[in-house]
Image (cartoon, rainbow, N blue to C red):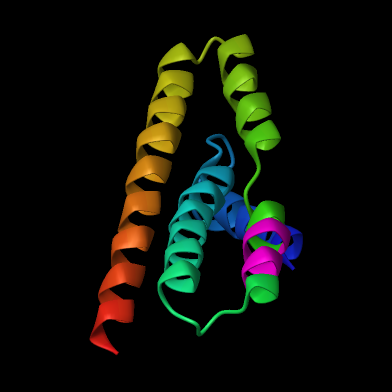
Amino acid sequence: MGSVLRYLTTLAAVRFVSPTFPVGTLVVNVVGCFLIGFVHAFATLTARISPEARLFLTTGVMGGLTTYSSFNYEALALVEQARVAAAVLYTVATVLGCAAAGLLGTWSARALAASG
C-alpha cells in the first residue's frame, strides 16, 4: 500500500509540480516521517492501536511509502547534472522536513492521546 501511494504521489508531483526536482520523494518522506512519528507515539500512549497494527502501519505502510534509496539516488543525480544548489536544497529540505514532521507527528499523537 505504501509503495503504491509513493508511486502515485511521484506521478502527481512530476505532472503538477516539477519533472526536474524530486518533489514526490520529498513529500512522501516528510509525510511518512509525520505518520510514523504519530502512529508510534499514539500506539505507545493509548491502547487504540494494537502492537500488530503498529508494526503493519510503521514497517509495512510507512516503510513502503518512504524511501531513503530514492532520496539518495535523486540527490546524487542532481549533483551529476551539475545542479549542486538543487541537490543541497533537496537534501536540507528532506533532512529538516523529515525531522520536523516526525516531531510534529509525535506531538500530535500525544495531544490526541491526552484529550481522550
Q: Name the residue rendered at 56%, 79% in the picture.
A: 49
Q: Where is the C terminus found, in terms of image quarters? A: bottom left
Name the one closer to the observer, 54 or 64: 54
Is 24 contained in the magenta span? no
In the image, taking residue 103 as reference, residue 84 lies left or right, namely: right
Residue 102: give x, y in percent of width and height.
Answer: 40, 51
Name the dominant secondary structure of the magenta segment: helix
In the image as oriented, which residue stretches furthest toward the bottom? 116
Residue 56 in picture, x, y percent from top left: 71, 68
Q: Residue at x 50, y 82 (%)?
A: 47
Visible residue check, residue 11: no
Q: Is residue 101 positioned above or below 35 on the image? A: above
Question: Which residue is depicted at the point 56% across and 38% down?
Answer: 22
Residue 76 visible? The answer is: yes
Foreground pick, 112 / 66:
112
Q: Is residue 50 above or below residue 87?
A: below
Residue under the point 37% across and 61% down: 105
Q: Give the tally of numbered discs.
A: 0
The picture places residue 89, in percent across and down from the top left corner, at 39, 26
**What is the quadrant of the N terminus in the image?**
bottom right
Q: Is residue 15 left or right of residue 99?
A: right
Please report the bounds of the magenta region as a residue range. Answer: 54-60
Q: Position of residue 52 (x, y in %)?
A: 70, 73
Is residue 55 located in the magenta-colored stretch of the structure? yes
Q: Quadrant of residue 115?
A: bottom left
